[in-house]
Image (cartoon, rainbow, N blue to C red):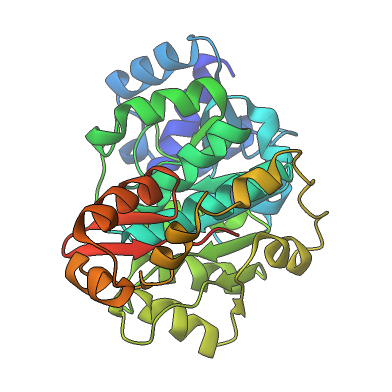
Amino acid sequence: MDAEDLSVLLSAIRAPARIQRKIQQQSNWSTARRLLTDAQQARPAELQRAAAWLKQPNHHLLDWFSPTYPELLRAIPQPPLALFVHGNPDLLQRPQIGIVGSRKASPVGLHSATHFATGLARAGIIVSSGLALGIDSAAHRAALSENTTMAVLATGPDIYYPPRNRQLQQQIAQGGLLVTEFPPGVTARRDHFPRRNRILSGLSQGILVIEAQRQSGSLITARLAAEHNRAVLALPGSIWDPAMAGCHQLIREGATLVTAVDEVLEELNFAPVPTSSNHGKENKCCGSLANLNLLANVGNETTSVDTIIARSGLPVAIVTEQLVLLELEGHIVSVAGGYIKMGRR
């Protein structure tokens, strides 16, 4: 894209939604220029920053008139006029599933996000999310360790948000793809997150909600997915856990209840996960009968050490030692007040 068209595009991004809809009915940026007023013109600093960003390696701009603009996204209401992408743009053409959930995720929620993202990535599916803390980050890391991942940003492509995810964002840019409708230099604002969520939904075949309260941005993404005729899937959890209330609400409203990766793949007509050669080793439990007995005394909700000792009838020293081994092997996780049993599917 030359400087003149880039200037028109940046001006169009600033234009009201009704003007953007008219622009999308045009054939190119030259004809779109007629719809823009002087008040909407891009500032020189914005144009300079965007042009400089585009000159860097693996930086791309897919505009509305580009043949590589994702067709799934083109079909949603109010699609973005352009996508600024950092990484491998070919990933936009591959099947993907969005994983979303709480920013303040529980250990079980993080474990579930890691489990499902790992399995989906092994099946060749692009796992996408919003690069937020909690469930998003766990899903990105797990998918990136197995294959690749895509993050949809609520900022410009050169802004690190949240700052704590700076390293993860850099890793995704190198081994996956960052996508945003916001030009370089644009910082996070509250209204940017629903806009990000519609892109995440629009690019995906389905949205999987791992853990969400009733008032949650994840539910916004799920409802956008339903409006976009995408699959909505949700994990069940304890009826006493407010962190799962949003998932239960989605299930009551018609979302598909899933408890395994293969159920997600089946719902979306994808091939099942290939069997791993070391799958059996990963699913073996503890190496001794005592550990097996001890594991049976750890609940799916927080169980104190005193309770584990009382239930098992084992000496304190043995319980303490074996809890450490169980945690190292990934069967339990230490939380405030005790331990929680983790699934080994």
Question: Measured along the vertical axis of the image, is residue 88 above or below residue 140?
Answer: above
Question: Measured along the vertical axis of the image, is residue 74 above or below residue 315?
Answer: above
Q: Is residue 154 left or right of residue 66?
A: left
Q: Is residue 94 left or right of residue 15?
A: right
Q: Residue at x 61, y 52 (%)?
A: 283
Q: Is residue 36 left or right of residue 34?
A: left
Residue lying at the far bottom in this picture: please name it. Answer: 252
Residue 195 locus on image (x, y percent): 42, 55
Q: Is residue 130 visible?
A: no
* Residue 196 or residue 125, whichever sits in front: 125
User: Which part of the image, by quadrant, shows the N terminus?
Assistant: top right
Q: Residue at x 49, y 81 (%)?
A: 250
Q: How many marks?
A: 0
Residue 227 locus on image (x, y percent): 59, 73
Question: Measured along the vertical axis of the image, is residue 131 above or below residue 84?
Answer: below
Question: Measured along the vertical axis of the image, is residue 73 above or below residue 213?
Answer: above
Q: Residue at x 63, y 36 (%)?
A: 31
Q: Residue at x 38, y 76 (%)?
A: 244
Residue 72 locus on image (x, y percent): 70, 53
* Residue 92 or residue 23, whichever sits in front: 92
